[in-house]
């Protein structure tokens, strides 16, 4: 038949745990007298961190006046607890001080100089738990800085807020380690207050049963607790006192649970996962003081014992009291050479590196043994594989294998052997015949494992942060791309169509700007014509041939009309206005160059004797060129008409071309008349003919390029925005090259003519 946990508890049955030892108890040295009070020291050294978890942040600074019970730090995080002023006085220093730790390394400590008044800060005691809610009770326990006073110093408020319902609440009053009697005397003298503290826990956790476990070597404490339960009116079935056999380490949490309930806490789990919570009897007393008296944890009972102690016993000691000062009050001479002071019991305690270290929350005993009582560390011998350590281990581990792995720094193998389940009770080292300090090896290996685990956790956290950052950056990039795509889609949807109002407005602005552009082109043509007329008048005054001037003026007027016609055409076709002005300027420059060329040719012909026959040939060639150009202009007009060009514009171009041809014919005729009056110069005439032919050839190529461009436009070639400008620039460059080449030839011919004339003069 299977019984439930509560049924098994109510049956009164006790269980046992494997292993364990029975060392000499030596408790009678310190439990024969009541708890004593000590005077206050001149200075207190209060470490900021006295528990498992992160320390709090400072609330005071040097020079501040504080009162007894005033918080000196503020908790930061769930695993953080504050510390309080043990008495009233002045903050004298905040810095590093010797720690109550096996390493003796300094830690952050608040130095308080006592003023001797020992004045309390403001307190608000209560008489009934009904005055507080469960949340307020938990908050007061936390702010009072209460931690496990059995030695582990785990924050009590964390244990009192389990995730699962609590079936059994266990009060640990075993105090199994030899020499220590602090809990024994506390139960004898303050049993009623301990029961009040249990009532607080009962209110918070509402367990089905409360088991008070105490070893059978404390008869006076057992009697006091049972009497207090009867006086409190507690249901004896709900709160049960269980007297267990004395065996070390029955006071360990997992071992006591196994003794009282028969349940074994699995490896890697905590009692709360099985519906159980355990609290030390000293912590229960501190909880009562915090809730009912509004007193934080600023003092505790400390056992001072050992054969070297002149006045052994238990004392109320304020936290932060220097250990060397405390030992002096018990008539101990710390100057004795080679005397060690152990904080804790002989099994789990450690030797203090410095007696200047202060009393902290985990200080339950100061042991001053003689060399006979606790011999010094014997010489470590080799392991003989006797197996006694395995028999004594209450956690059912293999201490010898753990020792080999720890010594070889094989941490993974040690961890595979459940090294972290070791409770460091020291039973294995106690029974070892080779005097191997096994627990010390285990502590070092466990510390290294925890360090590696912390590094791994930090690395994993860094990896998670990195991946989260990469995901965030990728999401932001995708969001930007989506925004850009949406904006582009909005622009495309809102772009103006050919029929839109924006396009019509732009066309209206262009048409409005046409008159001003046409006016500028007319003014440019007029200025070019006036300059040509001025040059003709000047030449006439200088006695030059009026026919030459008339020819030059006619050419200039024709070019001006041609430029004007081109400007009109550009305006009608919607060409860019700045391009039309450039074309007009080019046309004016061409007209000016042609006029100068005609003038220079006329001068040369007048100075030399030209052959009339050659001149007639030139005139015929020029007439043929003019006729061809006229036909070409007419053909362009027909093509434009066929392609939907403006007929008026074509007629205008044809008229301009005809005027140019007529002017050139007149110029040639004038040249012929002038040449007839002079002596013939056959060589010079051939050069002139070559120059004229080159000019005609260049112009023909330019016209041919223009015709090709026009034909491309007529055949439906896809125009681009840059095509008109490029064609215009190409034509300008071709014309400029032809003119430059003609001028160069003309200059060479003129120079040659001058040499011939000079030679002829010499011959005469």
Image (tube, rainbow, N blue to C red):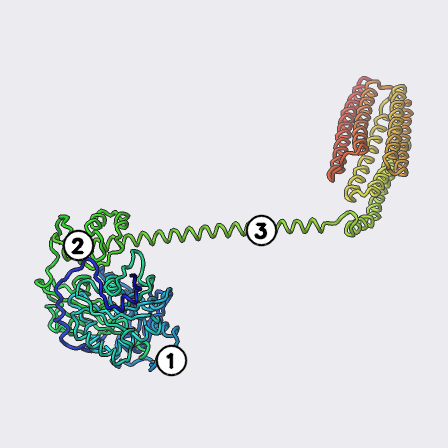
The residue that disc 3 covers is 480
Q: How far across and down, in percent of the image, does residue 11 sit?
A: 25, 68
Q: CA distance from mark 1 to mark 2?
A: 52 Å
Q: Is residue 704 left or right of residue 74?
A: right
Q: Nearer the viewer, residue 18 or 284?
A: 18
Residue at (24, 59) in percent of width and height: 423
Seen as rendered, the residue at the extreme front is 1
Camera sees residue 297: no
Circle 1: is it few (<14), some (14-19), or many (20+) Cα within 10 Å?
A: few
Residue 620's tag is: none
Query: Which callout, 1 or 3, points to the residue nearer the camera?
Result: 1
Query: Is 554 situated above or below 359?
Result: above
The residue that disc 2 covers is 391
Q: How far across and down, in percent of the image, does residue 331 sit?
A: 12, 73
The residue that disc 1 covers is 131
Circle 3: is it few (<14), some (14-19), or many (20+) Cα within 10 Å?
A: few
The disc, 1 or 3, on the residue closer to the chain's N-terminal end is 1
Q: Tally the numbered discs.
A: 3
The disc, 3 or 2, on the residue closer to the chain's N-terminal end is 2
Q: Give yes or no for contact between labels 1 and 2 (Cβ–Cβ under 8 Å).
A: no
Q: Is residue 571 left or right of residue 38?
A: right
Q: How far across and down, in percent of the image, does residue 526 sit?
A: 86, 42
Query: Which callout, 1 or 2, points to the residue nearer the camera?
Result: 2
Residue at (19, 74) in percent of width and height: 221
Dot 1 falls on a residue whose secondary structure is: helix
Q: Is residue 709 left or right of residue 441?
A: right
Q: How far across and down, in percent of the image, does residue 302 sit?
A: 20, 71
């Amino acid at each position: 038949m299977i019984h439930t946990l509560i049924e098994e508890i109510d049956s009164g049955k006790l269980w046992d745990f494997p292993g364990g030892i029975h060392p000499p108890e030596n408790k009678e040295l310190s439990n024969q007298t009541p708890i004593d009070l000590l005077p206050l020291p001149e200075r207190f050294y209060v470490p900021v961190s006295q528990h498992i978890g992160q320390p709090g942040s400072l609330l005071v600074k040097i020079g501040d006046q504080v009162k007894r019970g005033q918080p000196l730090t503020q908790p930061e995080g769930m695993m953080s607890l504050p510390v309080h002023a043990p008495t009233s006085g002045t903050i004298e220093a905040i810095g590093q001080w010797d720690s109550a730790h096996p390493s003796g390394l300094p830690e952050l400590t608040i130095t308080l100089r006592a003023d001797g008044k020992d004045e309390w800060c403001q307190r608000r005691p209560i008489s009934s738990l009904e005055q507080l809610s469960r949340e307020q009770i938990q908050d007061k326990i936390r702010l009072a800085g209460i931690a496990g006073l059995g030695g582990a110093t785990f924050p009590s408020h964390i244990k009192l807020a389990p995730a699962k319902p609590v079936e059994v609440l266990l009060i640990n009053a075993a105090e199994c380690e030899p020499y220590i009697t602090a809990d024994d005397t506390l139960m004898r003298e303050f049993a009623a207050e301990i029961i009040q503290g249990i009532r607080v826990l009962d209110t918070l956790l509402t367990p089905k049963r409360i088991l008070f476990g105490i070893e059978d070597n404390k008869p006076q404490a057992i009697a006091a607790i049972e009497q207090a339960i009867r006086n409190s009116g507690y249901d004896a079935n709900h709160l049960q006192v269980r007297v267990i056999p004395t065996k070390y380490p029955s006071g360990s949490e997992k071992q006591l649970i196994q003794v009282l309930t028969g349940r074994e806490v699995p490896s890697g789990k905590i009692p709360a996962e099985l519906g159980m919570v355990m609290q030390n009897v000293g912590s229960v007393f501190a909880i009562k003081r915090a809730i009912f008296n509004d007193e934080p944890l600023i003092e505790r009972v400390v056992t001072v014992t050992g054969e070297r102690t002149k006045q052994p016993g238990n004392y109320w000691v304020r936290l932060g009291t220097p250990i060397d000062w405390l030992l002096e009050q018990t008539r101990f001479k710390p100057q004795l050479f080679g005397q060690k002071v152990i904080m804790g019991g002989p099994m789990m305690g450690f030797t203090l590196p410095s007696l200047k270290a202060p009393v902290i929350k985990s200080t339950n005993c100061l042991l001053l043994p003689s060399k006979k009582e606790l011999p010094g560390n014997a010489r470590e011998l080799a392991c003989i594989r006797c197996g006694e350590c395995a028999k004594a281990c209450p956690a059912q581990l293999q201490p010898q294998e753990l020792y080999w792995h720890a010594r070889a720094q094989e941490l993974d193998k040690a961890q595979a052997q459940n090294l972290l389940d070791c409770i460091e009770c020291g039973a294995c080292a106690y029974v070892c015949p080779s005097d191997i300090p096994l627990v010390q090896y285990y502590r070092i290996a466990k510390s290294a494992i925890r360090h590696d685990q912390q590094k791994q956790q930090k690395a994993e956290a860094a990896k998670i942060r990195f991946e989260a950052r990469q995901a965030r950056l990728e999401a932001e990039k995708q969001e930007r791309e989506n925004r850009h795509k949406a904006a582009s889609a909005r622009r495309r949807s809102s772009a103006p169509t050919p029929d839109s109002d924006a396009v019509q407005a732009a066309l209206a602005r262009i048409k409005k700007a046409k008159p001003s552009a046409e006016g500028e082109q007319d003014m440019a043509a007029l200025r070019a014509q006036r300059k040509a007329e001025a040059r003709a008048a000047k030449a006439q005054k200088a006695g030059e041939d009026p026919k030459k001037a008339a020819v030059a003026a006619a050419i200039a007027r024709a070019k001006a009309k041609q430029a004007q016609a081109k400007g009109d055409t550009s305006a009608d076709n919607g060409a860019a206005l700045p391009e039309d002005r450039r074309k007009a300027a080019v046309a004016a420059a061409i007209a000016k160059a042609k006029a100068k060329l005609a003038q220079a040719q006329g001068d040369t012909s007048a100075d030399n004797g030209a052959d009339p026959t050659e001149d007639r040939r030139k005139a015929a060639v020029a007439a043929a060129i003019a006729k061809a150009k006229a036909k070409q202009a007419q053909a362009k007009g027909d093509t434009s008409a066929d392609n939907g060009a403006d007929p008026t514009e074509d007629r205008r171009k044809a008229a301009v071309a005809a005027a140019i041809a007529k002017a050139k014919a007149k110029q040639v005729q004038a040249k012929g008349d002038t040449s007839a009056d002079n002596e013939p110069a056959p060589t010079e005439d051939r050069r002139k003919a070559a120059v004229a032919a080159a000019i005609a050839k260049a112009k023909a190529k330019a016209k041919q390029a223009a015709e090709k461009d026009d034909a491309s436009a007529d055949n439906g070639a896809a125009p681009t925005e840059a095509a008109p400008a490029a064609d215009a620039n190409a034509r300008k460059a071709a014309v400029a090259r032809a003119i430059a080449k003609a001028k160069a030839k003309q200059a060479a011919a003129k120079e040659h003519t001058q040499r011939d004339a000079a030679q002829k003069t010499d011959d005469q």
